[in-house]
Image (tube, rainbow, N blue to C red):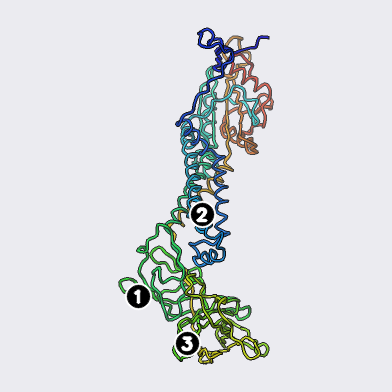
Amino acid sequence: MATYRPEGLEDTFDATRVAGSSAADGSSDAPDAPPQLPRLGLTGWARWAWRQLTSMRVALLLLMLLAVAAVPGTLFPQRAQDVSEVAQYIADHPGSGPWLDRLGFFDVYSSVWFSAIYLMLFISLVGCILPRTRAHLGALRGRPPRTPRRLTRFPAQAGGEVDATPEDVARRAASAMRRGPWWAPFARSYRVDVHDEGGGTWSAAGERGYLRETGNLVFHLALVGLLVSIAAGQMLHYRGQAIVVQGRGMANSVKEYDTFEKGTAFGEDSLEPFTLRLDDFTARFDEQTLEPRDFAAFVTVTDPDGTESAQTIKVNHPLERSGAKIYLQGNGYAPQLTVHDAAGEVAFSGPVPFLPQDEVYTSRGVVKVPDVSGDQQQIGLVGYLLPTAVEVTEGLFQSAHPAPDAPLLVLSVWSGNLGLDTGVPQNVYELDESRMEQAVDAEDKPVTLYLRPGETVELPDGLGSVSFDSLTRYVALDLRHDPALTWVLVFALAAFAGLAASLFAPRRRLWVRAVPGAVPGAVPGQGPGEGPGRTVVSAAGLARGDDVGLQPELERVLADALADLDGTTWAGASTGSSGPARPTTSATTDVTDATDASTDGSDHAGR
């Protein structure tokens, strides 16, 4: 049975033709020679890899992979945030800890594999955007599609008759489509094209909705901007936290901060060498609910040239210096303590910050005394500060108010090896009790010391004494500098605007055709444009997807185009009737037939 083969179609891999040609040439007697497939080569494989990388599918996969790669950063401590926590984790997990460190799980966001995924996603987005931008710019310079021959097959339709010429109707329709909405009448709404179809027939084509693709491109460009901004911020940012006790100060230097986090491109010379001194701190609380109402830190800032200026730092009102902001992050009490060892020497003297634990500022703190005389064991004091101490039962106190009306210091005593020489960083607010023993009394109960300001008590087991000299305040300051924050906000807003435009901008096409009507009683064979016949107007609209506003939009355009014209009638109205510019939602059969007949150039009867 013979099969149909279109003329001109050549099949390079037809085994019969290959065998036949081989036999004719005498080069081979094999009837079934295998086809020879072309080789891609290095250039072909590179082009294929580039197309795969810049596809939307791969971009989505890379985005998901980036999210998965960021998970270890939330499961394991990160060296950039807490070096001591990382060291402690490695010490607690001697088997897996070193391997996790080699694989970069403690520096996830600066690791090679996370950076590789980040760069591949960046390249994929750029490679996807560039050709789409080129195609979109070409489409913006193009003309709207020509008016189709048959308008009856579109979902939105309208029509009517008017005494104006077809050219006038088409140009008025184009002007109505160009005009923007009522709230922006000067904004161009549609790209339009007026066309003379011949035989006296004129049409106007309009197209809008390229803002949808523009918004899509803006969204993707904003994503690229976000990636660049975040990467720049990670490289250039720095952040430091420090506790400053009232009456003391600090210098803006990396060594002066308790913790300091910096980007890979940060240089210490970028810090302005100013100093800051905490002069006073005030706190105001609600007397009924004890809720905080106001915190204010009064500081003196000294510039490099020696100029001093008084500043106030409040919550949500940071101090700005050299592009960085200094926030008031917290506050508390720092009792001034003096510890003498067994030999009577001063082993420790200074303020010790205690961390608040509740709304009445019940604060916990640790005093580590490593510098003792001779072979004496090192001393550790752990306890609580009660700003306004009230005795609930015998030997049991609690704080009743956050203000320091009746401060009381409650301490337990430890002795042994503090573990400060092990090389593992320690938290200053935690005591490593693994190599220490707690002091107990004759009944084997832990010894508890109670001190008020100005009091001195002896330590058990002849370890020395401790004095509560005074009570001062401290503030926790947070210095932050990230030059990319403004750009992150700008690109985030641009991404939101682009996404909104790509989702809500309607894509529509409208066509209006004006056909000259024949004179009543015209002689057959005469052209349809001869005589003072009425102009038959038909319009149609098409949208991408479901668009409930398409039909009202078509009616608006047709109503604006035919407004104030003499003898305007609409499809479905009786002959000779007139009325306001109000098109119907569908054209009658005789109007559409007249439109199609005029397009074909045949004679038709006017209504």
Q: Which residue carries the number 1 mark?
A: 308
* Depth check, front residue: 164 or 307: 307
Viewer-nearest of discs 2 and 1: 2
Question: Could you tell me if residue 226 is visible in this image?
Answer: no
- On the image, the x and y values in percent for residue 160 come to 63, 27
- In the image, residue 271 lies at what x, y percent? 37, 65
Seen in the image, is 16 located left or right of residue 110? right
Q: Which mark is residue 338?
A: 3
Image quadrant for the C terminus?
top right
Name the residue beneath numbered marker 2: 103
The answer to whether residue 477 is left or right of residue 392 is left
Q: Nearer the viewer, mark 1 or mark 3?
A: 3
Helix, strand or loop status at disc 2: loop
Residue 387 pos. (x, y %): 57, 84
Mark 1 vs 3, N-terminal side: 1
Q: x, y percentage for residue 186? A: 49, 41
Work out which residue is located at the far top of the displayed protein and give it: 24
Q: CA distance from mark 3 to mark 2?
A: 46 Å
Indicate the amino acid at tag 2: Leu
Which residue is pictured at 53% across the width and 31% down the height? 172
Q: CA distance from mark 2 to mark 1?
A: 49 Å
The reply to whether callout 2 and callout 1 are in contact (CB within 8 Å) is no
